[in-house]
Image: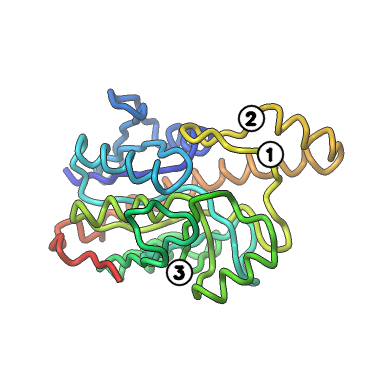
Amino acid sequence: MKSLLLLIEGDDELRPVVKELQATPVPGAQNPFEGTLSNKTRIIAVTTGVGPEQAYRVTTDAIRQFNPDYVLSAGTCGALVQGLEVSDWVVTGDVRAIGQAHQQWSTFETLQDSDETAAPRLGQALKQTPRWHQGRLVTVADEPIHCAMAKAEIATLHDAIAVDMESYGIARAAVENGLPWVVARVVVDTPALPLPDLGAMNVHTGRPPLSGIAKYVLMNPLAGPQRLHGLWSLVQTYAFHLVRILPEFTDGSRVSAPREECQLV
């Protein structure tokens, strides 16, 4: 039976995926869940927590425990360029670490998966609903990028279209273990519509503090609740589409590809 390890940044993002998969908990340090697709592919879904170092550690441990054939970085990301809108997807096998990355990783190091068909296959499975974009994603280690000017500078400097805080760590663990990998994330903020600043997220659960949520709502009594509900709805819809496309994607996955083909650039 083929198996796919699905890594997602937070408990709130994982929960709807688990529901769509009808997955059940299995023993493990990060409370993983296991489900089976219609094509009999085994799915292991795990919360990574926030940041590339945390994601790297969790992914490495999960690979050792479950011995998957393929690794998928799922969850949310932010758009860096115009043309990407909230609810669009970014699918890519090209990620770069920038900013305060772990000292063992050289800044600007780029990872590319050898399976160049992975991102297009994901896009084809989506069938244009929702829209999807392929391009470089950068991973930051310190904090989310809220400033439109900073996003524009990052996009230009790194030839990137999106940013997150986990995919480089996930990809790095996959490469070191000789596994093919791909990123499939939904856009939740754009340069024109930044994420709400809710305070520092819990590194293990990905959740902001309740005090930060309360402060945001109090300061934005009309737009705040609507924005938060929109983010919640977006994550539910993302989970639905993700689980819908996985059978078609895994049917064509090169799970038996030679493991040395994954590249560090």
Q: Do the residues labelled 1 and 2 touch (CB within 8 Å)?
A: yes
Q: How many numbered discs sit on the rendered protein?
A: 3
Please give left or right for residue 112 compared with residue 186 in the image: left
Please give left or right for residue 180 compared with residue 48 in the image: left
Q: Indicate the quadrant where residue 263 lies.
A: bottom left
Q: Name the residue under label 1.
A: 198
Residue 49 percent across, percent down from the top left:
45, 38
Amino acid residing under circle 1:
Leu
Going from N to C along the chain, the mark reached first, 3 or 2, is 3
Q: Indicate the quadrant where residue 112 lies.
A: bottom left
Q: Are marks 3 and 1 in contact (CB under 8 Å)?
A: no
Q: Which residue appears farthest toward the front when viewing the image?
A: 103
**Mark 2 surroundings within 10 Å by alpha-carbon count, few (fewer than 14), some (14 through 19), many (20 or more):** few
Q: Which element type, helix, strand or loop, lies under badge 3?
A: strand
Q: Which element type, helix, strand or loop, lies under badge 2?
A: loop
Q: Is residue 118 above or below residue 36?
A: below
Going from N to C along the chain, the mark reached first, 1 or 2, is 1
Front residue (pair 189, 232): 189
Q: Mark 2 points at which residue?
A: 209
Residue at the image position 61 percent from the left and 70 percent from the top? 81
Amino acid residing under circle 2:
Pro
Q: Which element type, helix, strand or loop, lies under badge 1?
A: loop
**Mark 3 surroundings within 10 Å by alpha-carbon count, few (fewer than 14), some (14 through 19), many (20 or more):** many
Residue at the image position 41 percent from the left and 36 percent from the top? 47
Q: In this view, does 200 lie above or below 71?
A: above
Q: Name the residue under label 3.
A: 136
Front residue (pair 158, 118): 158
Residue at the image position 69 percent from the left and 64 percent from the top? 148
Q: Which of marks 3 and 1 is in front?
A: 1
